Amino acid sequence: TCALPIWTLHHALDRVSGGRFGKHFPGGAQVVWIHTLGRRSGQWRRTALLAAPDGDGWVIAGSNAGQEQIPAWVHNIRAHGEGQLEVDGRTIDVTFTELHDEDRRRAYALLVDDWGGFAMYERNARRQIPVFRLAPR
């Protein structure tokens, strides 16, 4: 879908600019980078995502742009609950916590408020989109 080329461009812009550009998605939503440990490879992976601030942390969703398949980084987080978050040029050690029930609904609403496309993703995915809170360690 159209999200794949946008994220591919976003990764290239980040690499070429040394992280100076691409801190916000078209429309203004905050872009963060998460570092997760690959559950099979044991290698660190860096992934760009949209995020919403939540108290002293952030929330992210495994929406995969509304596709039915859960993104690989979700499986990595479920296997290894610690990693890093890059936001606005800062890198923070974080703990990833999967949210459920009312906590999940509240956090997903924060994401929708920041970027309305998340509402469409939830309708299109035909699965419950996993949501995680990233808390500083």
Image (cartoon, grey):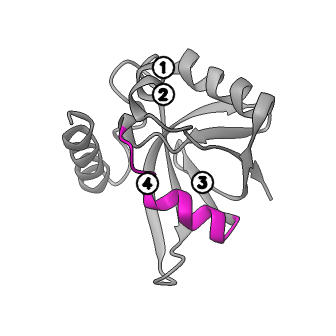
Q: Quadrant of residue 123?
A: top left
Magenta span: 67-81
Callout 2–callout 1 Cβ contact below 8 Å: yes
* Mark 3 vs mark 4: in front: 4
Name which residue lies at 37% across and 44% down.
20
Kindly report the distance in space between the C-alpha atoms of the residues bearing marks 4 and 2.
14 Å
Q: Secondary structure at mark 1?
A: helix
Earlier along the polypeptide chain: callout 4 or callout 2? Answer: 4
Name which residue lies at 57% across and 15% down.
113
Residue 129 vertical placement versus 11 (above, below): above
Kindly report the distance in space between the C-alpha atoms of the residues bearing marks 2 and 1.
5 Å
Q: Whole-percent x and y of residue 70?
A: 45, 51
Q: What's under tag 4, amino acid-wise?
A: Pro
Q: What's under tag 3, amino acid-wise?
A: Leu
Q: What's under tag 1, amino acid-wise?
A: Ala
Q: Quadrant of the N terminus?
A: top left
Q: Front-most of 81 and 30?
A: 81
Q: Front-most of 88 and 6?
A: 6
Label 1 crowd bin: few (<14), some (14–19), many (20+), radius 10 Å? some
Name which residue lies at 48% across and 27% down.
122
Callout 1–callout 3 Cβ contact below 8 Å: no
Which residue in the structure is indicated by mark 3? 85
